[in-house]
Image (cartoon, rainbow, N blue to C red):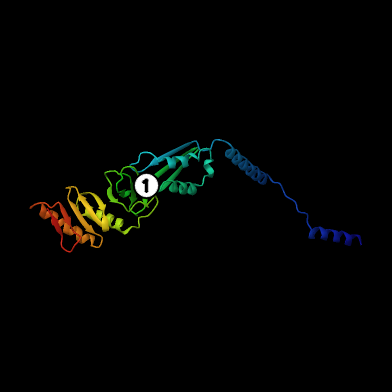
Amino acid sequence: MKKRRVKRRQNKRLQFPRRYLTLTTPLLLKWLLFFAVIFLLIIVYKSQLFTIKTINCITTSDQAFCPNTVLAELERLKGQVILTLNLNQIKSKLLSADPKINSVAIDVNLPNTLTTTISYQPAAFAIQIATDSAGFVVDQSGSIISLEETIGSNLVKIITSQAQHLSVGDTITNSVINYAFSLSRALKQNYIDFDQIIIGQFNTITVILNSNQQVLFSIQNNIERSVTSLQLILSKATISSTPHQIDLRFDKPVLKY
């Protein structure tokens, strides 16, 4: 009987073994390493070593300095932990801070320096408000990227009274202004030098050539055909007398001397 009881006890012990953790040296080292890493991360996060202290702003265009709107956004980053920055969020804020910005690149230079490189949209032309020296600068996609007090001489000027409702960030949808811009590109491609384009009454477009000649266009006419006609007239005018006004709004050009 005693032997049977002993066997039953042994069987019970085999069926329900005690669970315990064997604390070996490798396991102990792993736990110590884990807690050491956590401790170091806390120290780094709380210390001032990896907080942003220096921010460099570089532009890749003719604009020598970053605009104040961009600098204000970058200034807010000082004091933040450089390791936990959300770079995509920063880029989004900088893009919205200045419509002229085309792209933003951010380089993290440990331990505490941030370098921002900004590329600007290339300006295509300017819309000058009639009776005013101020104007909107427009990029190649037709978006207004800035409002300038004076228009630079390197930009095509389209003078119109139809720009009163426009503001920075808008896209040009006015068909007459878009026609004038397409006309300016066609003139440049054909090496016809001009000073400015004026949108007048009844959507008549007047181009002032560098020779001070006036050329009248209609938005109803094909641009390429009109520019080809103008080239032919100008080439003949170098031989004979020069007209002061060339009217291309009709089927046959009208010349005024």
Q: How many neighbours does mark 1 have within 10 angstroms: few (below 14), some (14-19), or many (20 or more)?
A: some
Residue 181 location in percent, x, y?
28, 54
- Please tell me which residue is depicted at 41% across the width and 43% down the height of the picture: 117
Q: Count the marks: how many?
A: 1
Residue 205 picture quarter = bottom left
* Residue 256: % across, % down: 13, 55
Residue at 52% x, 41% y is 82
* Residue 200 falls left or right of residue 29: left
Q: Position of residue 109 (x, y in %)?
A: 47, 40
Q: Nearer the viewer, residue 1 or 240?
A: 240
Image quarter (top left, top right, bottom left or bottom right) of the N terminus:
bottom right
State the image coordinates of residue 192 (x, y, percent, origin top left): 19, 52
Instruction: Point out the residue furthest to the right here.
Output: 1
In this view, the residue farthest toward the bottom is: 251
Q: Which of the two residues, 181 or 72, is positioned nearer the viewer here?
A: 181
Q: Nearer the viewer, residue 235 or 75?
A: 235
Query: Toward the viewer: 78 or 165?
Result: 165
Write the residue at 87% across / 59% down: 6
Q: Which residue is mark 1?
A: 146
In the rendered structure, the answer to whether residue 206 lies left or right of residue 148 reads: left
Q: Which kind of residue does numbered mark 1 sit on? A: Ser
Secondary structure under the numbered disc 1 in the rendered image: strand
